[in-house]
């Protein structure tokens, strides 16, 4: 299983880098996980968007879904064969209006999931945990058939006890790390130390800090997370990063 980071900021793009968007590949299967601002251009630099098998949205905030509309136009207007048509776009069903927008003519088709759902997408098995965020949002656990390798994405969330169990034994834990350690309440994202502690409690093999802040010292963010994570290797998301899990 391979993870390619297409965008990693929370909120808004900055200095040519987009918001949350990640390409997950297993063999020739391609899943776009979140589709934030700048995702389509970043995806075009990595592969033909027409080669996608599916899109998964963890929630409908714009920094995770802004480029879905232009991806839908791409599938409508770009000539040439698409690998899958209509392209399935998986989204939770707790927001009927946004879920309805996942279907666009004959080009994309919304497919719903809930907290208790198990999805089999090619060689990948996905399960979900609803997080604690101002809107319904879901962490996702992805297990690769054959290898048993596990990728967990917290999506957007504040810290709560069930996260560690959901992420237990992950080979790679992607944590929404939008704040330095001393960020004041209220918090709807993890701090650096909370992300590090989560990785340690979950027994994760590695921690990737993502959904990063634009105006904080990222080296400090990483140091704080590493101090809390102990022996778990902590790295920062970057658009040059491709991770073989």
Image (spheres, rainbow, N blue to C red):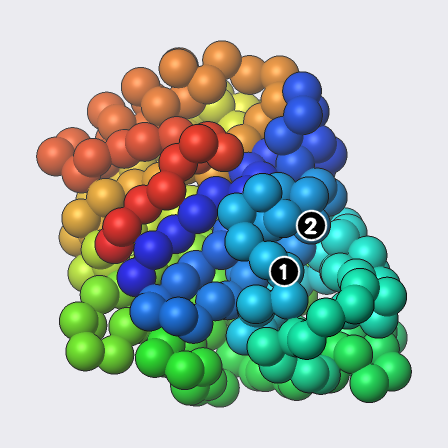
Check residue 243 in the rendering and tell me which mark sits there, or answer none: none
Residue drawn at x 39%, y 30% is: 236
Apparent side of residue 139 relative to residue 40 in the rendered image (left or right): left
Local SS, label 2: helix
Name above or below for residue 203 compared with residue 90.
Answer: above
Where is residue 196? Give x, y as percent.
30, 37
For marks 2 and 1, give the CA distance.
Answer: 8 Å
Circles 2 and 1: CB distance less than 8 Å? yes
Name above or below for residue 177 compared with residue 85.
Answer: above
Local SS, label 1: helix
- Of residue 244 and residue 90, the one placed in the foreground of this image is 244
Q: Which quarter of the figure is the C terminus placed in?
A: bottom left
Residue drawn at x 28%, y 72% is: 144
Residue drawn at x 66%, y 55% is: 35
Name above or below for residue 64 compared with residue 58.
Answer: above
Tell me if mark 1 has few (under 14), some (14-19) or many (20+) residues whose alpha carbon lies within 10 angstroms of its own.
some
The residue indicated by pointer 2 is 40
Apparent side of residue 68 relative to residue 178 in the rendered image (left or right): right
The residue indicated by pointer 1 is 49
Residue drawn at x 78%, y 79% is: 107
Q: Residue furthest front?
A: 80
Where is residue 111? Give x, y as percent.
66, 85
Give the quarter of the image for residue 233.
top left
Where is residue 56? Give x, y as percent.
58, 68
Tell me if residue 5 can be seen: yes
Tell me if mark 2 has few (under 14), some (14-19) or many (20+) residues whose alpha carbon lies within 10 angstroms of its own.
many
């Amino acid at each position: 299983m391979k993870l390619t980071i297409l965008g990693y900021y929370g909120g808004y793009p900055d200095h040519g880098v987009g918001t949350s968007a990640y390409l997950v590949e297993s063999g020739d299967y391609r899943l776009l996980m979140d589709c934030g601002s700048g995702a389509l251009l970043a995806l075009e630099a990595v592969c033909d968007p027409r080669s996608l098998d599916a899109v998964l949205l963890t929630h409908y905030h714009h920094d995770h879904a802004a480029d879905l509309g232009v991806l839908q136009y791409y599938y409508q207007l770009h000539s040439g064969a698409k690998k899958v048509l209509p392209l399935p776009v998986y989204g939770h069903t707790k927001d009927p209006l946004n879920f309805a927008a996942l279907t666009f003519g004959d080009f994309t088709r919304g497919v719903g999931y809930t907290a208790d759902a198990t999805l089999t997408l090619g060689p990948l098995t996905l399960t979900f945990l609803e997080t604690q965020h101002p809107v319904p949002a879901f962490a996702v656990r992805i297990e690769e058939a054959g290898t048993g390798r596990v990728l967990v994405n917290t999506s957007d969330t504040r810290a709560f006890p069930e996260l560690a169990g959901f992420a237990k034994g992950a080979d790679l834990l992607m944590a929404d790390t939008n704040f330095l350690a001393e960020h004041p309440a209220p918090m709807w994202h993890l701090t650096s130390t909370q992300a590090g502690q989560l990785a340690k409690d979950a027994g994760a093999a590695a921690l990737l800090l993502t959904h990063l802040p634009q105006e904080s010292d990222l080296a400090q963010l990483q140091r704080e997370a590493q101090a809390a994570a102990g022996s778990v290797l902590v790295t920062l998301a970057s658009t040059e990063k491709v991770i073989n899990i």
